[in-house]
Amino acid sequence: MVPYGGGTSVVGGVTRPTEPIGIVISLDKLSALVSLDEVSGLVRVQPGMTGPVLERLLGARGFTLGHLPQSWERASIGGYAATRSAGQASSGFGRIDDMIESVTLATPIGTWSAGRVPASAAGPNLMQLALGSEGAFGIITEITLRVRRLAIARRYEGAIAPCFEAGIDACRELAQLGLTSAVIRLSDEAETVATLAMSGPVGLKRKIFDRYLAARGVGQGALLIMGWEEHSEAILTARRDAAWAVLKKFGVVALGKGVGATWEHGRFSGPYLRDTLLDSGYLVETFETATSWAELPNLHEVARRAALAALVDPEHTPYVMSHISHVYETGASLYFTVIDSGGAGSIKRWVAAKAAISSALHPAGGTITHHHAIGREHAPWLGAEIGPVGMGLLRAIKSELDPTGIMNPGVLIPVAE
């Protein structure tokens, strides 16, 4: 029995390629806004509602959830919760885990509701068992989310750091001082080159742009996007000025609002560009991870080399690029895009490459996934991360809530177990 929301999983969350599917339960009709408590800032919704619909309904009342994953146009609210997703503005609004007040889960042994108040010390937080459960324990039927008032002041801007390492240090300092913008995205040098080639200045404007960077001593560097969303111009100005005082210490150079506006305009265009490249005969895939600030530079290099080593051959070299887009006081995520030649055997080649990359992450201090979830693709590596006791707990919970094993078999816990 497989619950189906927006169908945007990229880790096999709703597919069973080697086994027949018994029942697929579409949540498309279970998509109502049940209630909005404007005093408390809480909205109760059903799981099939999509992000754009929720934002439209909330915006009409002066509120926002602020959760904008790249799959926002199609992903469902239930899918957000079931996969522990993170939106592009997570540095300002938090992950979906931070936004959920309560959840109701329909399991094979009965319906279970968890969470009701802002915080509680009534034992372990059992609501967390539903978040990230990916349909393995039951189907989320209702979610209460914490919403915020719409920002009055907004500013999206671009900047460039001398190199990726300097950009990492700048982002770390901002995070640890509490000065991050709602959106903060740092591209490595490879992604910076690709981004500027696709959407940067051209012709004479590009020559002037390059001379400007050279004069400021940053060359190509590492592109930084910041999106500020505050409740007054005064707050935005104060926070932005404080952040820029930090950024300048690390040699970061301002590029202005135009770069930020270009990124904001195309913030959900990645999947469409991928489809265009696929239609042109290329292989385009992604993977992501997260680690501490201390481990981040090494993990970036380990993951990049693992992708290159797994895909390179005498005739061509794949293009591997990455960015940071979710920062915390103690660390950050890394999101990689791999572009390779397509053709015969390309899928088989990527499956082998993804296995090699996945095996390299944990020894280098990374998680198997920061926000894509486990699904079926990552299930073989979950045990290395949470250990045998952790896997035993998952199996025990699965056995208790789903004694006959009918709920989305294969996610989290491999079917062979």
Image: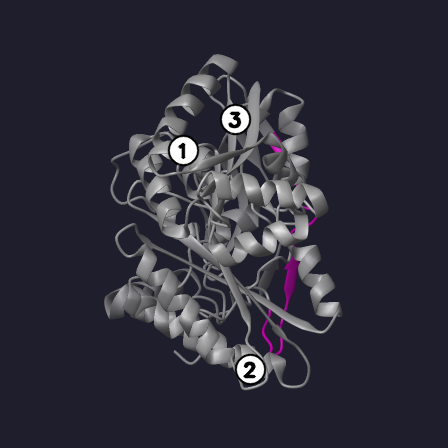
Residue 20: say if magenta.
yes
Q: Is residue 61 left or right of residue 403?
A: right
Residue 289: say if magenta.
no
Rounded to the nearest whole Å, what is the CA distance between mark 2 and mark 1?
A: 39 Å
Residue density around tag 2, few if under 14, some if 14–19, many if 20 or more, within 10 Å: some
Q: Is residue 157 left or right of residue 417?
A: right
Name which residue type carries label 2: Arg
Q: Earlier in the sequence, mark 2 or mark 3?
A: 3
Q: Which residue is mark 2?
A: 349
* Residue drawn at point x = 54 percent, y = 42 percent: 142
The reply to whether discs 2 and 1 touch (Cβ–Cβ < 8 Å) is no
Magenta extent:
15-34
In which quadrant of the rendered image does the C terminus lie? bottom left
Would residue 63 be seen by someone viewing this image from the given angle? Answer: yes
Q: Which residue is at the front of the view, 176 or 378?
A: 176
Q: Which residue is mark 3?
A: 229
Identify the mark at residue 180; answer none if there is no mark: 1
In which quadrant of the rendered image does the N terminus lie? bottom right
